Image (spheres, helix red, strand yellow):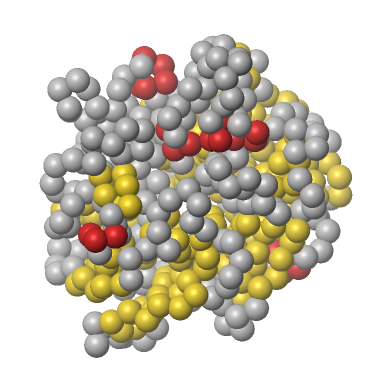
Amino acid sequence: MTTANPSTASESSAPAPHLAGNFAPVRDELTAYDLPVTGTIPPELTGWFLRNGPNPRDVVTPHWFFGDGMVHGLRLEDGRAVSYRNRWVRTATFTDGVPVVDEQGRRNLRAGVANTHIVRHAGRTLALVESSFPYEIDCRPGHELETIGAHDFGGRLTTAMTAHPKTCPTTGELHFFGYGGPQPPYLTYHRADAAGELEVSRPIDVAAPTMMHDFHLTAAHVIFMDLPVVLDLNRRGMPYGWEPEYGARLGVLRRDDPYGEVRWLSIDPCYVFHSLNAYDDGDQRIVLHVARYAEYGDNSPAHLWRWTIDLVSGTVAEEQLDDQLCEFPRIDDRLAGLPARFGHGISGEFPGSGPVPGALLRYDLHSGTVARHDFGPGRTPSEAAFAPADGRPGGPGWLLSYVYDASTDSSDLVILDAEDISAAPVATVHLPQRVPYGFHGNWLPDPAG
């Protein structure tokens, strides 16, 4: 066990909302084996469930987004919960205090907190934050969740990398972008091949440095969201703010012409942290599903919306699909960029929101129906990742989520049958410490063979 540095926060002062309750960090890095289980873990699940999120070492941070990254990992094998461990991502900022921006205003892409997502591509497991390079994490036996170091694609990556890259299920390519610099180019599109070699880096002209957290990929297109949350380095704390007068638009780029024209289409001012999925509907229409906020701010809820781009008329039809709170939307990632019938999201607590009934939602995007799993009083889920049961994309599988129980100040891994989420959990793995609310993760099955 490794114990973090003691808190520098005042014990007598009330913590900020993003440092209170289950947003508060845990102080210990633990390793525990043979965890107790209620129910039966599906024996098909052999691999890691990894979830990343902010866990500030010194406890004092001005915003939820700024805490040091900590990966929580649960190892499943042959129907057993073999081990749990949590480890800080040891970036240059964590180990040596290297700032992202120095006193001369120069940006260090090897610094940062790597606290937002964790993905696997071309044999590498990468912890991501959108301000910096990714950091590679070691998941080999005996090296579980140790930090290897910053990954810059052999020196070819010269911008930050989004925390929401998309892997094309057909080509194996990894599509992503970098944004966030105070000087142009404010946006750069990147593509790596299936072997992890960076082969496209193309600047895209936008008017200002907006906060572009996510984007969309289809079989034929890449779609960027240039939305009115704009960088202003004079702001204290969070440097991005809501500026609706900037306008909102979607930028469409053909995948077969990565250096070609980006076509911009206007939409109503709004903000989107997370896309659910996107796909081409014939040659002239693109359908996008997003968790949409009417505006950017602590008290604005997100709901599931559909945007339909008409490439002939150059217009976007916008439609709200549900009135339930919905964030952290996910699909079976083997259908990324393709027509996926089912999507999942959660209704849960966010800093300053107060208690919210914790639920997981399953959207049938064909019929428009919504199934719901309520976790019970005081039990709140984090983002749910889909774990397939077989090789059929869109087929059966399970939803895995860390669930916090306020009555016991503890967390479980809950496994639900994705095709019957209203039913009781298939299995609940009881963890040795709580998992603070965080951001994103994945089920990473062991490679075949």
Give the residue at the far right of this rendering. 39
For image coordinates 50% across by 33% down, the residue present is: 54
Which quadrant of the structure image shows residue 255? bottom left
For image coordinates 21% across by 30% down, the residue present is: 107
Q: In the image, residue 398 lies at what x, y percent?
A: 69, 59
Residue 154 visible, this orientation: no
For image coordinates 63% across by 57% down, the residue present is: 347
For residue 89, above or below residue 260: above
Q: Is residue 325 left or right of residue 109?
A: right
Q: In the image, residue 418 lies at what x, y percent?
A: 70, 64
Q: In the image, residue 244 lies at what x, y percent?
A: 29, 60
Give the residue at the far front of this rendering. 13
Q: In the image, residue 198 lies at what x, y percent?
A: 26, 48
Q: Nearer the viewer, residue 64 or 301?
A: 301
Which quadrant of the structure image shows residue 393? bottom right
For residue 414, above or below residue 248: above
In which quadrant of the rendered image does the N terminus lie? top right
Q: How many marks?
A: 0
For residue 334, above or below residue 115: below
Residue 311 visible, this orientation: yes
Q: Is residue 250 left or right of residue 127?
A: left
Q: Is residue 185 left or right of residue 367?
A: left
For image coordinates 57% across by 61% down, the residue present is: 326
